Image (spheres, grey):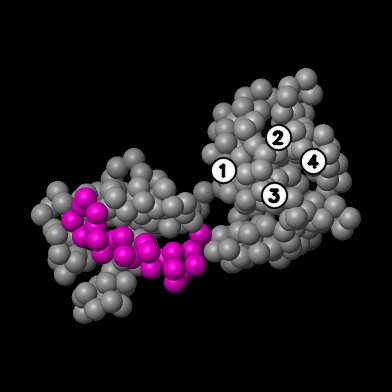
Amino acid sequence: MSLIQRQTVAAELRSLPLGRTAVEFLDYLVVEAGLSENTILAYGRDLKGFLRFCRQHGIDKIADLKPPVVQGYIHQQARSSKGENTVKRALIAIRMLLRFAKLTGLIEDDGSGVLETPKTWYRLPAVCNKQQVARLLRAPDPREPFYLRDKAMLELLYATGVRASELAGLKTSDLNFDVGYLRCLGKGNKERVIPVGRAAVLATQDYLAQLRPKLAKPASGTHLLLSRTGRALTRIEIWRLVKKYAVRAGMPRSLTVHTLRHCFATHLLSGGADLRSVQEMLGHVDVGTTQIYTHVDHERLRRIHKEFHPRP
């Protein structure tokens, strides 16, 4: 979390009951837990909503956060338009806050053992076919000033399956064109190495040779993707650029950076890649998270059925 974002979240929390404890908890996550910046920021937003609920119900002491209070908030969120994963994450944030309060001696029992986790539906991710992805990769116009950068951006996203935040954080030193791989830091600052295909290597080399030197400023450092003013592209800017080219290519408006990550995994599996290799490239801790892509690739399932069923 950047300093400005951290200060903004802290100021908003301090204006609420129990806000001081919540800020101390987020500081603890930054210093001790090693969670990603985006995760900590999301926890801050979740706790802000919960503390507003506490204020509405006159709760201003950490000792008053009994299980019925937490369950009441979770049920309220479940009845609203919030997604199931959002509700589940909010409960996790509250549980962690209560455990922190117990750890620091503010309460004797955190009550987390009796808090029910809302059931989450197993949703299949949206995936484009290979022809649609090829159309998206051709969407940047060579006559536009940032064509080389945006072409490299799209090629890298599809070639490696990295998240927007991971791509935004890439440095020029993270790419090895001789061997054909890149190194990135994922969630929890965990490093992984991902192979990069020839198309993405060539697009990135063109950008580095022809456009990046023109964009670079003293403050640019070694960040790979730079904006018009020479600063590193942010995660949000990468999302907006992908949306822009998705619309231009006539793709579904729901297409996001994460859709390309889903395409990367699904197309690898359909080509015969093993699940554990895809898990490693995606940076998934649990192979169960990666297994969802075996359900998305219907053609692969039909091929396996035809090959191995005794009565095809």
Real-space CA distance between mark 3 and mark 1, rounded to the nearest whole angstrom: 17 Å
Q: Judge whether 289 appears above or below 249 on screen.
A: below
Badge 2 marks a residue whose secondary structure is helix
Real-space CA distance between mark 3 and mark 2, rounded to the nearest whole angstrom: 12 Å
- In the image, the segment drawn in magenta is 14-36
Residue closest to the far top: 143
Q: Is residue 167 visible?
A: no
* Residue 125 percent across, percent down from the top left: 58, 45
Residue closest to the far right: 178
> Viewed as shown, does residue 311 lie left or right of 257?
right
> Viewed as shown, does residue 129 lie left or right of 54?
right
> Viewed as shown, does residue 71 lie left or right of 124?
left
Q: For residue 277, what is the image quadrant? A: bottom right
Residue at numbered disc 2:
215
Q: Which numbered marker is on residue 235?
A: 1
Residue at numbered disc 3:
222
Real-space CA distance between mark 1 and mark 2, rounded to the nearest whole angstrom: 18 Å
**Given contact means CB atoms under 8 Å apart, are the residues at marks 3 and 2 in contact?**
no
Who's the residue at 44% across and 64% down the image? 30
Question: Which-is-in-front pick, marks 1 and 2?
Answer: 2
What amino acid type is highlighted by mark number 1?
Answer: Arg
What amino acid type is highlighted by mark number 3?
Answer: Thr
* Residue 82 percent across, percent down from the top left: 36, 44
